[in-house]
Image (tube, rainbow, N blue to C red):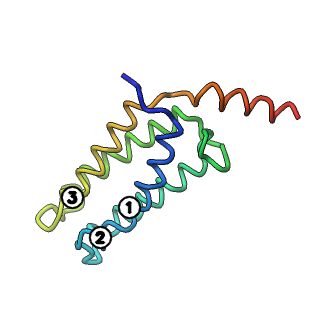
Amino acid sequence: MRFIPTRFHGILDYIVGILLIASPWLFNFAAGGAETWVPVVIGAMVLIQTILTDFEVGIVKMIPMPTHLMLDFGIGVILALSPWLFGFADQVYLPHVIFGVFSILASLTTHRVPSRAYNTNNVQKERI
């Protein structure tokens, strides 16, 4: 069931992207290895992807919303499995798993199409 509006999803993406980048220092696991850099890189990817998505809070509007949601799903899987994929589960795993599962759930519960108001305004801008 998809119940999260794309606008809200986009706002969450900006917040989550920033939190992912800051999480090694916020949650005290910044040891300088994969445990640190996986969330930093993925956070940057989330921000770039959001900026490039064609929805209410996107800036460049190149990536269709369904593609954005597929990327969110893949990012979530990689992030959730990263402690075991990169061998740092004995040091830290919970923040990676929580952010990863959040991304997976958000991708599965967000509308695939931006709101009608966004689509109407976007079409009117193209005509001008």
Report the residue marked by disc 1.
19
Which class describes the residues within 10 Å of circle 1: few (<14), some (14-19), or many (20+)?
some
Residue 12 image point, x, y percent = 44, 48
Q: Residue at position x 24%, y 50% from top? A: 98
Residue 1, by quadrant, is top left
Report the residue marked by disc 3.
83
Say which of 43 and 1 sits in front.
Answer: 1
Which class describes the residues within 10 Å of circle 3: few (<14), some (14-19), or many (20+)?
many
Q: Amino acid at mark 2?
A: Leu
Residue 105 image point, x, y percent = 32, 37
Please, what secondary structure does the residue beneath circle 2 have? Answer: helix
Say how many tags the image has. Answer: 3
> Is the Cβ of the residue at disc 1 closer than 8 Å to that at disc 2?
yes
Determine whether 17 is above or below 106 in the image: below
Q: Residue at position x 65%, y 28% from top? A: 117
Determine whether 23 is above or below 120 in the image: below
The disc at residue 26 is 2
